[in-house]
Image: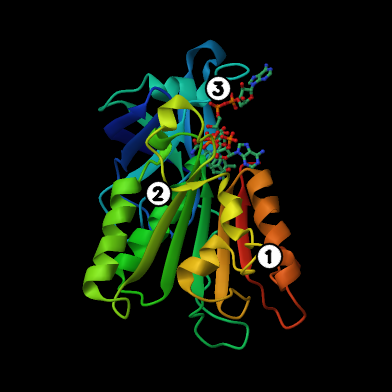
Amino acid sequence: MVTEMKSKVTYMELLKEDLVIIRLVPENGMPHYKTGQFLTIGLPIPSEKKIVRRAYSIASHPENRDYFEFVIRWVRKPLPGRVTTELFYASVGDTVYLGEPTGAALQISNKLPNGQKDNRRVICVGGGTGLAPFIAFAKHFHDTNDKREVVILHGASYVDELSYKRLLTDFENESEKRGRDQWNFRYRAAISRPKEYFNRSWNGHVGRVESFFTPDKKTGLSPVEEMVGEKITPENTIIYICGYQGTIDGVIEYLGPKGFVTEHEKKSDGSFAIKYESYG
Ligand SMILES: Cc1cc2nc3c(=O)[nH]c(=O)nc-3n(C[C@H](O)[C@H](O)[C@H](O)COP(=O)(O)OP(=O)(O)OC[C@H]3O[C@@H](n4cnc5c(N)ncnc54)[C@H](O)[C@@H]3O)c2cc1C
Ligand SMILES: NC(=O)c1ccc[n+]([C@@H]2O[C@H](COP(=O)([O-])OP(=O)(O)OC[C@H]3O[C@@H](n4cnc5c(N)ncnc54)[C@H](OP(=O)(O)O)[C@@H]3O)[C@@H](O)[C@H]2O)c1
């Protein structure tokens, strides 16, 4: 039996023709859930005469009891995706059906195997709309006054796909203002098609997002290590990744040799330093 929440679209912000931020509110109130989880959005597909459901990462944080937020790509190729095409025709006030929040792949590690608090630096790597769960992370850490060091790395093809640039820049500025002992947050973006005309104003990091982990030939430090001011190790850092399998493999290729193992392949003492969710 599918447990579903009848919900209303309350906000839609089209960032470009195929990228939308959307808020959904269940009629019978918000369920409790964990930061980093996803749920299914179901929509009736007229040609199939049934509700079709797809998984979407929740970009809002559980402390927000007002709405669920998502950032969704309209899948167009090779054929228009069924749910996303229908969703891009939806308007404020329309009904959709939400499944229960679920998923442990990107739940935040708060405890080490020895029972101590997991205070390691948190580095989140989001490819495209794979940024979504890390928006929930950033807001959750911020609103719960968590003192861990948090770094968010976002990779996109085009500058107008840096969907939460303003929020994340504001969080970093706040960190500078309040002091890193109070709120320790950094955000960096990578643009993978820097030569395209539309990206002509970009003067930040170029390449796919995993290139933040490429060590410099002279210093041996990667751009992310330069930024945080030390070598990252499984003892001082935990990495969360959401995106294409290529992004996940790319990050692991750099970090595996440094002793980082995934939660799926824990060390004998139960420790791990990488958690990920693949686009699948
Ligand atoms: C855990 C999880 C979280 C996710 N979170 C997000 C998120 O936050 N944001 C987001 O945008 N997406 C997210 N996704 C992806 C999402 O679940 C859907 O897969 C995506 O939106 C496409 O759904 P669709 O119904 O529009 O496309 P579908 O109809 O399922 O089509 C999928 C692909 O198959 C192709 N296709 C369909 N029919 C055919 C055919 N007959 N022949 C050849 N090719 C065909 C389509 O062109 C398309 O490329 C997530 C997925 C998972 C597993
Ligand atoms: N949790 C999930 O499962 C999840 C979450 C979000 C989205 N999705 C689904 O994933 C699909 C695409 O997502 P998107 O539109 O957000 O991504 P996108 O904007 O197409 O790409 C984002 C970034 O990933 C790079 N990239 C593309 N292919 C790659 C590969 N094979 N390996 C490594 N990097 C790659 C792109 O580089 P280039 O510029 O070089 O192409 C770009 O920099 C959509 O169908 C979406 O529905 C799934």
Q: CA–CA distance between discs 3 and 2? A: 21 Å
- Camera-side mark, 3 or 1: 1
Q: Is residue 238 above or below residue 247?
A: below
Q: Nearer the viewer, residue 203 or 150?
A: 203
Residues under numbered marks 3 and 1 in contact, where contact means CB atoms less than 8 Å apart: no
Q: Secondary structure at mark 2?
A: loop
Name the residue carrying label 1.
255
Q: Nearer the viewer, residue 187 or 35?
A: 187
Amino acid type for the residue under numbered disc 3: Gly
Pick whichever of labels 1 and 2 is earlier in the sequence: 2
Q: Position of residue 241 (x, y in %)?
A: 57, 55
Amino acid type for the residue under numbered disc 2: Ala
Q: Quadrant of the N terminus?
A: top right
Residues under numbered marks 3 and 2 in contact, where contact means CB atoms less than 8 Å apart: no
Determine whether, in the image, residue 177 is placed left or right of residue 235. left
Residue at the far left: name it: 177
Q: Secondary structure at mark 3?
A: loop
Q: Position of residue 263 (x, y in %)?
A: 67, 67
Q: Is mark 2 within 8 Å of ligand 1?
A: yes
Q: CA–CA distance between discs 3 and 1? A: 34 Å
**Disc 1: CA contacts within 10 A as few (<14), some (14-19) or many (>=20):** many
Q: Is mark 3 within 8 Å of ligand 1?
A: yes
Q: Secondary structure at mark 1?
A: helix
Point 43% across, 39% down: residue: 98
Amino acid type for the residue under numbered disc 1: Leu
Name the residue carrying label 3.
81
Residue at the far top: name it: 47
The numbered disc on residue 59 is: 2
- Camera-side mark, 1 or 2: 1
Q: Is residue 6 above or below residue 104?
A: above
